[in-house]
Image: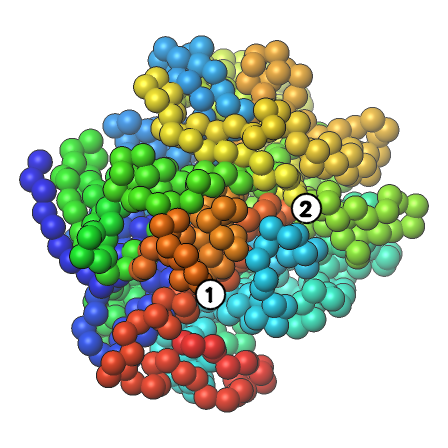
Amino acid sequence: MTTYLDRYDVAVIGTGFGGTMTALTVADTFKCRGKGESILMLERGTWWSTPVGTVQDPEVKTPQFLRDNGQPVQYWSSVDHFRGAVDLLLRCFRRKGNEDGVFELTRFGTNGFLGFGGRSDGVSILRACGVGGGSLVYANVTIRPPELIFDDPRWPAWSKPERDWYFELARDSIGHGVLWARSKRKGASPDDLKKVNVNPGLSNIATRTILLDPHFEIVQNPDEPAHPVRRVDAHGPAPDPQHQNWIDRARVFQNAMAGITGDYGTVDSSISNIESHPMQPEPAPVNFCERQGRCIVGCLPGARFTLNKQLMRASLGGTPKPDGTPVKPFYDRLHVRALAEVDVIEELATGGYRIHYVVRDAEKPTRVTRLMVEAKRVVVAAGCVGTNEIMLRSRDRGTLKNLSPRLGYGFSTNGDYLGFVEDTEKHVNLTRGPITTSFGHFNTPQSAITGGPAPNPAQFHTIEDNGIPRPFATLVGAGIPLLRSLANGRRPWYLVLKAALFYGVKYVARMWRGIWTDHTRRSEFFESEDERLSRMMCVAGIGRDEARGEFRLGGRGQSTLRVRRDDGKPFHEDPIYRSMKASLDRFAEVLTGKKGSTFLSPFLNDAADALKAKSVSLSHPLGGCRIAQGAAEGVVDEYGRVFDTSKSGPNAVHAGLYIADGAIVPTSLGVNPSLTIAALALRCADRIVEELDPAGDPSACRQVGPIFSVVGEEVPVLPGA
């Protein structure tokens, strides 16, 4: 197809936490400068939207608004039973011929014949593909790592006051919006803040519905004094009438967790819950969490703070107000190009960069047009896997020279683990509430309890509850074998066929028995998904692994990237998994009341080992382009600037080339990484702003006044913004 070339001042590859935080910070500065500077964001996926009416959009006008602005749109799967599972697998999983799917499962290794017989590298990664990046399918957990993580010598010097400042900025940037957070720190009035408010702020969701008092026990958090931990009072009466209105899973999880660690509570969620947010833009209606348990497959009420909301408001505006008043974009020189997949980045001899990419046809994604764009500055934020692949390709094809020899090194699984335990003593109900409500930390100073093991910071890990969306709940019994097959690289058609056959046989058998026996005894056939999962607990583990993985490009008959540990060991033998299993075994015994109970992982167990399918399956990959003091240890400096080995001195970097996503994180985090990635990206964005040509630049664009107070909160000066 025809090749075109256009030019922008800044090009951002990716629209996830790194890309959005960076692009909107720069856009805010460009708007203030008033020079007509432009930003292009390239996203390999499409826009995703709910197909049903919401509080804010009862007539479902948003998808058509996007189409009217030339943007491709897909709908979330909306069916909450077996047809929904089939829809997710057929339409929503990205694969050849369906490149606009939102979920992409990458199994690293050799492919084999038709997906069979290949050899796995021991890692499978589930990631998102769409405008908004990982925010589209994550569990909305906005959590900061404990300070012990930053004591690791692999982290360059980052002072505690500055770190606190950027984490607070990241909380506001996710909870309200990047432009809101920056305006707040510039002393904007409450009325002006409402004009740029996209989301109503982070929440702690624990009750069955809105407007119920959870009666939290408030516990001081020494790492974040401004944000105490909110949790169930495990020392109250059992059952405690104050907590009877809690989501069952949250109450059961936290009460059981209190028996094995002192560091637990309710997660901060990037989900609207109405009563938690005095800054919500009243009297305008706000979407809110309806406890449908669908976070990771698409929130139908539109309550999650997915980043596509911020990008749409900033670049396109919004659907007209009820009185017909148009909603203008915050910055009309910010452009989002969906279905645009980057191949390589080329450094130009005259300065700046040329990005080679393809744009897919919205109606037929296999049809592509090859394009190029030139930009003075390029921010690579394609996610850990995507960024490593682009950088490795660019190096190997010679379009980016003098990159660090450590490119691809330091990959971390972040200790990701998924497990199930059945026959819990109390009703859990996995399908109600947000996907994640609660956490428990292990091996922190606060985790020690009487009779428990002494904390070991090197083995820090987190365990969180993990709900199951109803479409997947219908596959209980078939679900775990299907997950194992998925991890082993089976083709989607095979998965659908196997699920359909298994489900069909069980369905017919249950229906036959139910018809003939239901009049005497209620049949299993008439049980709901809630009942089938009423005594099962699902958890997600995240831990401090050794971050010893290495990415490299794959060859013919292999995945596009390959991965291995630098010590030759399988990834599942990292010490963090033994430590996590010990915590989970104790947790399982408390939940079930049975000695010897344990959580089953569909990916890390004896059956998977026998099938040669033992694999660390994760959704929080980190590293490969990690931060370091110099090119001998890492790929970027502390501000995300890419090292240039042909130069020396403090500015030995490729001028105008940055990486700002999970790929730069130098160690595992042991918690959900979105807040940390956002904080690092905002720091990178401030450095980009500082490096802009100051000629004719209004001082108001670069500096902020003294400390000011907004709604009783004291906020420090924004450095260099």
Callout 1 crowding tier (Cα within 10 Å): few <14, some 14–19, many ≥20: many
Question: Are the two marked residues, 2 and 1, in contact with CB atoms closer than 8 angstroms?
Answer: no
Residue 537's spot in the image, x, y percent?
Answer: 68, 37
Residue 538's spot in the image, x, y percent?
Answer: 64, 37
Q: Amino acid at mark 1?
A: Arg
Q: Which mark is residue 327?
A: none
* Residue farthest along the left direction in this orientation: 2
In this orientation, does residue 506 appear?
yes
- Which residue is under mark 2? 462
Q: Nearer the viewer, mark 2 or mark 1?
A: 1
Residue depicted at x 52% and y 84%:
710
Rendered view: 192 above or below 607 = below
In this rendering, position of residue 339 left or right of residue 247:
left
Rendered view: 341 above or below 28 = above
Give the quarter of the figure containing the N terminus.
top left
Callout 2 crowding tier (Cα within 10 Å): few <14, some 14–19, many ≥20: many
Residue 529's spot in the image, x, y percent?
Answer: 57, 34
In this rendering, position of residue 78 left or right of residue 410:
left
Q: CA distance from mark 2 to mark 1?
A: 26 Å
